[in-house]
Amino acid sequence: MDSEDDLLNAHDMESGEEEDDFYSGETDDYSEGGEPDYGFVEEDVDDSVMIASHRSQVNYVVLKEEDIRRHQKDDIGQVSMVLSISEVEASVLLLHYHWSVSKVHDEWFADEERVRKTVGILDAPVIVIPTPDDGGELTCGICFETFPPEEILSVACGHPFCCTCWTGYISTTINGGPGCLMLKCPEPSCPAAVGQDMFEKLASKEDKEKYYRYFIRSYVEDNRKMKWCPAPGCEHAIDFAAGTGSYDVSCLCSHSFCWNCTEEAHRPVDCETVAQWIRKNSAESENMNWILANSKPCPKCKRPIEKNHGCMHMTCTPPCKYEFCWLCLNAWTDHGERTGGFYACNKYEAGKQEGRYDEAEKRREMAKNSLERYTHYYERWASNQTSRQKAMVDLEKARSEKIEKLSDIHGTPESQLKCITEAWLQIIECRRVLKWTYAYGYYLPDHDKKQFFEYLQGEAESGLERLHKCVEKELEVFLVAEGPSDDFNHFRTKLTGLTSITKTYFENLVKALENGLADVDSQGASSKSTNTKSSKTNGGGKGKGSSKSPAKT
């Protein structure tokens, strides 16, 4: 395998050419010389092949509400047909087993009687209710009023309750939340399930809407293969095929997120690192670091104090009002001209020479370094997020205004100006990736990998800035042009080339980071092996002039 130097040289071998030529779209020049290990160079691949490849890798389906209802109805129908039970009973079964059709089948055919008792689908009533022809009256188990048999309702168990009590019972449970989906008979300790037919018969129109909203939401929320899109106001769900590649999904509302943790899409960073980074951004630990780095405790009341004037004479806030020296933290009454006056402290200097303040200074310096390091990564993470949001606004502006205007000025069909929207879409995606590389870098401990990672990150940032500048700044010239020109055609070719190269570089960067920059480890092992062999060759002999230990310098 090539060494790290070879990789970097291969990547930079075209640096002598002018930038415009490099990004002119003539891909033949890009492939000259050895290709880097990660392939951060544009390959000559047909667009249709790339699109087909991308689609074949999609491992999820976005479902609208009508799609969810259709899937739900199909599952209920399948269970009803296979088990020869009613659709109401099939719904109860699927709710209990979290909408897993296979689980329902396995449990039912393993022990039907046990499943019936567990779920509450009784095959025989506990109490036999007389029919209207039998005459007599029945007592409601809730209000204890007597009613004729035609005014009494019950579920599979047969426990009698009047219509009014049933209506109140159902309405109360619906307004209590999704628990109404697993409703049981009002009789204490009775396991019989209350099916959808009872809700349909007795619930008000408003309560029915709530019930069916809970019913359809349960199909997504209880289903291990489905999740709602977390974007505000979006009602689409994602049906995901687990274990088939990336967790990144894109909803029809244009929101991209990680199906595993439901945070925004964050490749190449894993979910655990994202959780750590988000906790760090919102935790009080950074506030404490700032306090430790930029303040000192009052020697009397111990409250932290920030120095906001040049003088070393500090006065604590009321009710403490203790006056002390900022440098040595001793009482100000002990100070004067003999201790250095208002802007210095001989006591502190003497104590520092004796090592009296070493530990406190060390802690403060460590806190300051930690805060500066975090700030470095956070600022760049946040800046790329801001740039990404701005690019999304610019994309919409390009779609609604600029493309139509360019088409009119230069006489080019809008279908031939899709390179502009593709460039903005690529910028939005690359800003997202670049943003998360700063979280990746913050938690990257290995020094060798860090150096290589920072090189790759810098190249990615440089390439993205070129693309961003091209579509944001250079495009403006053609928006105010008086008529068509060959320069616009050259611009389109350049923009297409830039977009293609940037896309390839970032795709390979993501793969490299997800692989843990394993190539650095391989190169290190290879280098170590080479050095060992070289050492044996040069110093392995025992003849005259050989040495058993390294020469001292």
Image (cartoon, helix red, strand yellow):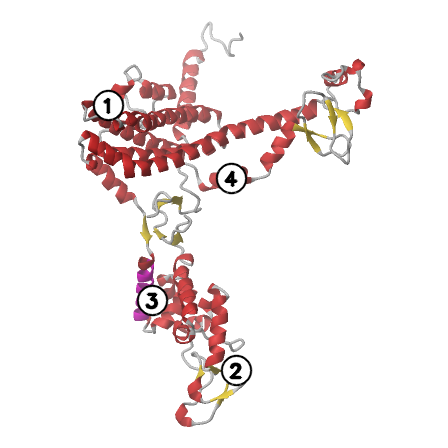
Q: Earlier in the sequence, mark 2 or mark 4?
A: 2
Mark number, residue 141 = 2
Query: Label 3 vs label 1: CA separation?
Result: 58 Å
Q: Secondary structure at mark 2?
A: loop
- The magenta stretch spans residue 251: no
Residue 167 picture location, percent across and down: 46, 76
The residue located at (27%, 33%) in the rendering is: 420
Residue 139 picture location, percent across and down: 51, 87
Residue situated furthest top in the rendering? 545
Q: Is residue 538 above or below residue 374?
A: above
Q: Is residue 167 left or right of residue 247?
A: right
The residue located at (39%, 50%) in the rendering is: 229
> Is label 3 or label 1 in front?
1
What amino acid is at disc 4? Gln
Q: Is residue 165 left or right of residue 55?
A: right
Q: Earlier in the sequence, mark 2 or mark 3?
A: 3
Which SS type dominates the magenta stretch? helix
Camera sees residue 259: yes
Q: Earlier in the sequence, mark 1 or mark 4?
A: 1
What amino acid is at disc 2? Gly
Q: Earlier in the sequence, mark 3 or mark 1?
A: 1
Q: Secondary structure at mark 3?
A: helix
Provide the residue span drawn in magenta: 68-82
Mark 1: few, some, or many residues within 10 Å (few <14, many ≥20)?
Answer: some
Q: Which residue is mark 3?
A: 76
Q: Which residue is mark 1?
A: 24
Q: Secondary structure at mark 4?
A: helix
Camera sees residue 37: no
